[in-house]
Amino acid sequence: MQRIFVGVVSSLLLAGSAWAFELSSPEVAEGRTMSAAQVYKGFGCEGGNLSPALNWKHAPAGTRSFAVTVYDPDAPTGSGWWHWVVYDIPSTSTGLPASAVVQAALPEGAKQGRNDFGARNFGGACPPPGDKPHRYVFTVHALKVDKLDVPEDASAALIGFMLHATGLGTAKLTAAYSR
């Protein structure tokens, strides 16, 4: 009986040793409405336009860097809306602080791509008035490369393509907002 128990426990430990890649935030919760702090300031919206703190753990083996994206698939553009693109985040990082829109607040070496507002920072939620609640998908990408091979002026779509081409795994958190 003891051998069976030891065998079962050993099997469970081996199976559970690859914890799932996980993303969390003290300011944005899965399936919940974002606060005014994460709402854009402009385009008729009056928010704080502050990126939330993001934390991740259990990255896949072989992760050499990370990227973070925030994407609204519900934007009435035909192609969604990129709110934030940060890449070349060192593999030693386990998150980003709140209000990391300032380059100095990002880990050393990290870069911000152009969002669909045309800026290199976090652009908060700002769906059209009266539209259904939009989903804002916060994703941390674990990558098998130290740096993305993209030009300095790369679009969010090109960076997104490269994230998929070099990705080892993703962890997501989806919040909502409407006005």
Image (cartoon, helix red, strand yellow):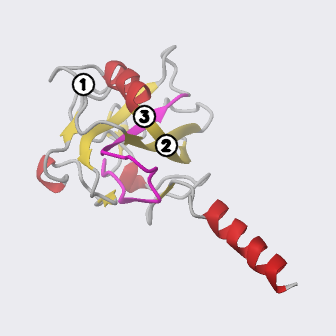
- Front: mark 3 or 1: 3
Label 3 environment density (alpha carbons within 10 Å; few <14, some 14–19, many ≥20)? some
Residue, x 48% and y 17% (percent of image)?
79
Q: Give SS at disc 2.
A: strand
Q: Amino acid at mark 2?
A: Thr
Amino acid type, mark 3: Gly
In this picture, which residue range is highlighted in magenta?
Answer: 49-73
Q: Disc 1 marks which residue?
A: 118
Q: Which mark is residue 142?
A: none
Q: Where residue 175 appears, x then y in whole percent?
A: 54, 48
Residue 158 located left or right of residue 150: right
Verify CB contact (< 8 Å) between mark 3 and mark 2: yes
Q: Nearer the viewer, residue 140 or 116?
A: 140
Q: Residue at x 88, y 84 (%)?
A: 1
Per the rendering, the mark at residue 167 is 3
Q: Nearer the viewer, residue 47 or 115?
A: 115
* 10 Å crowding of disc 2: few (<14), some (14-19), many (20+): many
Vertical order, 5 against 13 (above or below): below
Dot placed on the residue nearer the N-terminal end, 3 or 1? 1
Q: Position of residue 145 (x, y in %)?
A: 29, 36
- Secondary structure under badge 3? strand
| Callout 1: SS | loop
Is 135 colored magenta in this rendering?
no
User: Is 127 in front, or is 73?
Assistant: 73
Q: From the viewer's perspective, is the residue at label 2 or at label 1 nearer?
A: 2
Residue 170, numbered label: 2
